[in-house]
């Protein structure tokens, strides 16, 4: 189904302009991921709602985002800290969301977002705006992982790629054809995303490095943004996948898992099954993903 809105999943630790070294100067943040969120939302006058529901320190997280968006010149940023399904039905919150141009989910525990907001009137408004308006849904870390239909809820790297090492649950369902993982490089999450796509072999795995994200238009056209890399696991033409036949806790094997490593400016077209390499990296013709 065609949608008018934009998804921006982020791998975590996006620059907020609050560090002491030159990487965190105002000039840098104005070229960074949050600046792109603002532009996609309509500019500094856009109505942006930050939802820190996933976080265990919502006040600190909220203050960081208010400060970051203020540095970018934004004038209409509101915090919506939802801690129960009843709060997600608050008429004041519903009216704020109806007027919003962007919602930004913070990091933390992605299951809290689904628990308190999934299936509520508030989420219905978000989905309707995403489908029918030029509305932005952004999320970092847990806020990115919750966007998918099949969501990673946990799993350690020590048991990576043994059956059952990754825990899965239902996400918010904003995008049906991806499974998203965050902090992908720093926390060594290759194994758990590989098991996730072995379990759901028609879903593309998206591993987002920190301070790295994707701008996804029409659930299809994806552009990499930020300072790191995105790892794509495409399992749609696996030759061998023994997940269904090995017992829990046993090592798994799959073959023909296609992997792509993309950086800022690279693009992915799901419908056409093509990766487009940015000309700023090297001169190269388009590369088919399948």
Image (tube, rainbow, N blue to C red):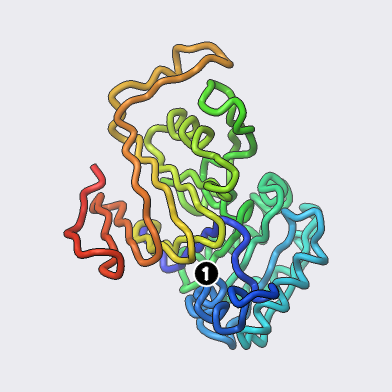
Q: Position of residue 50 (x, y in %)?
A: 68, 69
Name the quadrant of the C terminus: top left
Q: Find disc 1 in the rendering and name its residue.
A: 136
Q: Residue at x 57, y 15 (%)?
A: 248
Q: Mark 1, residues whose alpha carbon is within 10 Å: few (<14), some, or many (≥20)?
A: many
Asked if residue 204 lies left or right of residue 97, the reply is: left
Q: Quadrant of residue 94?
A: bottom right
Coordinates of residue 220 in the picture (x, y in percent): 35, 57
Residues 147 and 256: in front is 256
> What count of labels does the image hold?
1
Report the residue that reaches farthest toward the front: 21
Q: Is residue 152 above or below residue 160?
A: below
Residue 242 seen in the current view: yes
Q: Which residue is painted at 61% across and 28% down in the image? A: 158
Q: Residue at x 57, y 54 (%)?
A: 144
Q: Is residue 219 above or below residue 163?
A: below
Q: In the displayed structure, does residue 5 sit left or right of residue 127?
A: left
């Amino acid at each position: 189904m065609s949608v008018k809105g934009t998804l921006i999943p982020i791998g975590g630790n996006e620059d907020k302009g609050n560090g002491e070294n030159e990487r965190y100067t105002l000039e840098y943040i104005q070229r960074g991921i949050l600046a792109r969120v603002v532009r996609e939302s309509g500019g500094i006058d856009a109505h942006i709602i930050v939802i820190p529901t996933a976080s265990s320190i919502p006040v600190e997280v909220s203050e960081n985002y208010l400060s970051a968006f203020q540095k970018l010149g934004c004038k209409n940023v509101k915090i919506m800290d939802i801690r129960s399904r009843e709060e997600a039905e608050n008429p004041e919150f519903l009216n704020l969301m109806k007027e919003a141009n962007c919602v930004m989910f913070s990091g933390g525990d992605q299951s809290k977002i689904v628990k308190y907001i999934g299936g509520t009137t508030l989420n219905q408004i978000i989905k309707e705006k995403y489908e029918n308006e030029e509305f932005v849904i952004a999320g970092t870390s847990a806020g990115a992982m919750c966007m998918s239909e099949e969501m990673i809820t946990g799993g350690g790297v020590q048991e990576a790629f043994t059956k059952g090492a990754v825990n899965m649950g239902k996400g918010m369902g904003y995008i049906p054809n991806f499974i998203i993982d965050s902090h992908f490089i720093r926390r060594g999450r290759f194994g758990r995303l590989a098991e996730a796509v072995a379990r759901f072999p028609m879903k593309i795995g998206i591993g987002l490095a920190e301070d790295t994200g994707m701008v996804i238009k029409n659930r299809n056209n994806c552009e990499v943004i930020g300072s790191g890399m995105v790892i794509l696991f495409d399992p749609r033409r696996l030759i061998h996948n023994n997940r269904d036949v090995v017992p829990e806790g046993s090592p798994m094997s799959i073959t023909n898992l296609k992997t792509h490593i993309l950086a800022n400016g690279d693009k992915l077209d799901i419908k056409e099954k093509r990766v487009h390499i940015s000309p700023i990296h090297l001169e190269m013709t388009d590369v088919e993903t399948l």
